[in-house]
Image (spheres, rainbow, N blue to C red):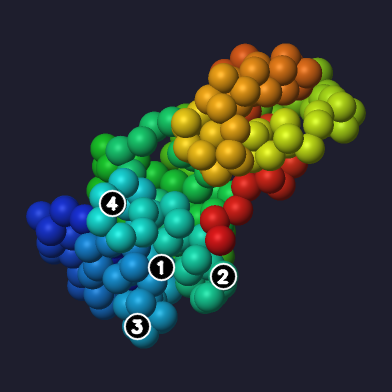
Amino acid sequence: MKLMIVDDHAVVRSGLASLLHGKHGIEVVGEAADGDEGIAKALQLQPDVVLMDLSMPHGKDGMTATAELKQKAPDIAVLVLTMHDDDEYLFRAIHAGAAGYILKSAPHDELVSAIRSVANGNAYLYPTATKRLMNEYLERHKHGDNGGAFETLSEREKEILSWTAKGYSNKEIAEQLILSVKTVETHKANLMEKLGLKTRPDLIKYALKKGLLNYE
């Protein structure tokens, strides 16, 4: 099983490589310090699994790199290894194409199991993430997905919904759409009221469900 590690911290990469290489049938075939290098090396080395960090300040971050790698090499499984125990990151990683999501605090045996799982074509989520996804599904099933409300949004509100879900601030959205920050804030408040959303994570989940996110 060929594994590649993408993380901006050299000590993390070397530690993981030392922990995993030559054990449990795993061969660490390469390392990368950012998303750009990770994509290039993965295309060259063709590992079975890429262990991908999300927060990398230089070059592409892990989320963008995951989406781009899956477009160029869909057979390579991406397992996100991150410190972010957060619904927002979890849902975005799944949408970007990650086959698995595991925390850096996970025990060694769990990490090995996750690597094996995604290498065999299965999905892997750490236990509390699985529970949260199940709860989200049950809530949507119970209350409905509010699908009709989306059609009540104006085109501008739909634009702002998409930009917000992608992580852009009100100021950045205003610059992109050539609007005032106040106008963006008003549109955002209106669309969230129409959709019955309370928080930004709720907005991101809704945008994912509607297919409004991409990482091109």
Give the alpha-carbon distance from disc 2 to disc 4, as whole Å: 20 Å
User: What is the quadrant of the C terminus in the image?
Assistant: bottom right
The residue lying toward the viewer, choosing from 133 and 121, is: 133
**Image location (x, y in percent) of residue 19:** 17, 59
Distance Cα–Cα, label 3 vs label 1: 11 Å
Say whether disc 1 or disc 2 marks the residue closer to the N-terminus. Answer: 1
**Figure check: 212 above or below 146:** below
Q: Position of residue 36 (x, y in %)?
A: 34, 68
Circle 2 residue: 71
According to the image, label 3 marks what residue? Answer: 45
- Residue drawn at x 18%, y 59% is 13
Image position of 104 with respect to 16: above or below: above
Q: How far apart are marks 1 and 2 (CA)?
A: 15 Å
Among the 4 quarters of the image, the one containing residue 134: top right
- What amino acid does circle 2 point to? Gln
The reply to whether the C-beta atoms of the residues labelled 1 and 2 are less than 8 Å apart is: no
Marked residue nearer the N-terminal end (3 or 2): 3
| Residue at the spot of label 1 | 49
| Residue with the mark numbered 4 | 56
Disc 1 vs disc 2: which is toward the camera?
Answer: 2
Tell me the kind of residue under disc 4.
Met
Q: Which amino acid does label 1 sit on?
A: Val
> In the figure, residue 52 lies in which quadrant?
bottom left
Q: Of label 4 and label 1, which has the lower sequence position?
A: 1
Residue drawn at x 38%, y 54% is: 62
Rounded to the nearest angstrom, the CA distance separating label 3 from label 4 is 21 Å
In the image, taking residue 189 as reference, residue 8 lies left or right, namely left
Residue 51 at least partly seen: no
Comes first in the chain, label 2 or label 4: 4
Give the amino acid at mark 3: Leu
Residue at the far left in the pictured view:
11
